[in-house]
Image: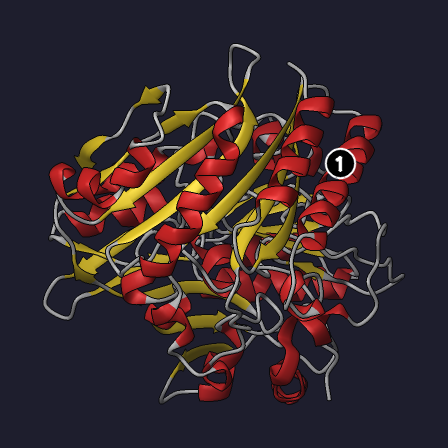
Amino acid sequence: MADFAVFKAQFKGDIVTPDDPDYSRAIARWAVNAQRRAKVVAFVKDEEDVRVAIKYARDSGLPIAIRGGGHNPAGASSSEGGLVIDLSRYLNGAEVDPEKRVVYVGGGALWDVVDKEAIRYGLATVAGTVNHARWLSFTGVGGLILGGGYGWLSPKHGLAIDNLVQATVVTADGSILTASDTENPDLFFGIRGGGCNFGVVTEFVLRLHPQREKVYSGMLVFPPPLLERLVDVTGKWLEEAGEKEAMMQVLTMVPDGKFAILVFPFFNGSEAEGRENFKAFFDLGPIADLTKEMPYEEINALQNPVVFHGQGMYMKGIAQRLPHFESDAKAFDYIQKVSGPEFKVNLLFEYFPLAKVSAVPSASTAFRRDPTSSILALVIWKDDTEENLERGRTVAHELAKVIIEGQQGMSSTQSLGYSNYGKLAIPTLENVPLLMCGADPEGVNGKELVPDKAKTVFADNYPRLQKIKKRYDPDNVFNKWFPITPA
């Protein structure tokens, strides 16, 4: 058993335990159902602190969780009775080098920090689609990048991992390594889509691109009867969409209790160009037009009011090869049947032109690149109860079933959707200190376990990842996000 006093003496950051006044804040999460009562929360200041924390936890037999942005609704960034390595307090900044066109980002940073800092220099990188301030945190930099990373700029610049130049990783044995094309290239391959299977990433170095100060976006609101025409227009638009445009659509219940289709168009240009580009959508006659030219850094805040801190959440990812009215309509009917003021069901469709993403060979990174659009079933409820969690899980799976049944020519692997939206149950392993990373394992209580799902998620890259796992984590310490079995 490790000595706690020695651990505290060696640790430079902040250590919070249940007896401390800020303990409740330290274990709070974006989704209330993700909160767990950790024995120790270690707010690390640097890589050495991470090394010390990992050693103490392993020597003490404590399960470990890693918190980056803290947005995991399944509780992957929390640990009941264990130790949380929290990157969010000190490793949360972003520093731009305008000459090299890169940004150095802490492993606990949120995308709003990156967006705002980079645009000061007329630059940007591929971020997520929601950013949020710290107490409303949704999308952390670490979880998004390690799981692939789609964003509004993906049509032009690819995935977030395609813009990752270098990373600093603390592995299970405490080694502090640089991962890049030239240093530890196998580890660099693994972390680009392989999640936290290989270590704790404390810093990301991301490539930046010239970005205009303002873009065209906002929200259009359509009534349910226009769904069929909207799906038709969306399919035609998607066939011709270029690198300057993207779109998100949401089937949801709006604040007045009515149901609507929310459309978030994005055009990397002026308002006049954007309105002309999306003219077919305006011709449908939206009942509200809240689109405008806006500062680039505001684009990732459009959905923040919906996914605020302190609610119960359940997420499940799926995929769609092409927009399909019949399945969308069936899903929307189901949403209207089960939603209410205190239990809201949302279905989000991400339409990003994929030519740039697909141009990168699948064997270049761990991420599985599919020619499909990502869909997210997001269920939100007020009261944090086991009954609501189970209901949320059931509803999300029913929506997934409806959408997948409406698709043809899509493999079982592709139907899993975007791995950052994918879910995985985690079996309980006694007497083994485990690490949870910041993506989205399904039911950390052990429900809905899918054996060997990592083989499906990583597809042809899985054997290579097994070899990398054997080199950097032979004891399988990091195994809470599509765990890879060492070769």
Side of 371 where 241 appears, left or right: left
Res 274 → quadrant: top left
Residue 35 visible in the current orientation: no
* Left or right, residue 370 beside residue 113: right
Q: Amino acid at mark 1?
A: Val
Q: Position of residue 77 (x, y in %)?
A: 62, 48
331 versus 78 height, above or below: above
| Along the line of sight, the residue nearer the viewer: 107 or 191 | 191
Residue lying at the far right of the rendered structure = 430
SS under mark 1: helix
Q: Determine whether 477 is above or below 230 in the image.
A: below
Q: Residue furthest top?
A: 256
Q: Is residue 48 visible?
A: yes
Q: Residue at x 10, y 68 (%)?
A: 99
Is residue 24 shown left or right of residue 135? right
Q: Quadrant of the N terminus?
A: bottom right
Residue drawn at (70%, 42%), measured in percent from left and top?
A: 399
Mark 1, residues whose alpha carbon is within 10 Å: few (<14), some, or many (≥20)? Answer: many
Q: Quadrant of the C terminus?
A: bottom right
Question: Residue beneath label 1, please?
Answer: 395
Q: How is the image coloured?
A: secondary structure
Which x, y percent locates residue 298? Answer: 27, 36
Location of residue 223 in the rendering, given as x and y in whole percent from the top left corner: 48, 22
> Is 430 located above or below residue 255 in the figure?
below
Residue at 67 percent of width and 29 percent of height: 333
The relative height of residue 442 versus residue 486 in the rendered view (above or below) is: above
Depth check: give the residue in front, 415 or 283: 283
- Please give the count of numbered marks on the rendered protein: 1
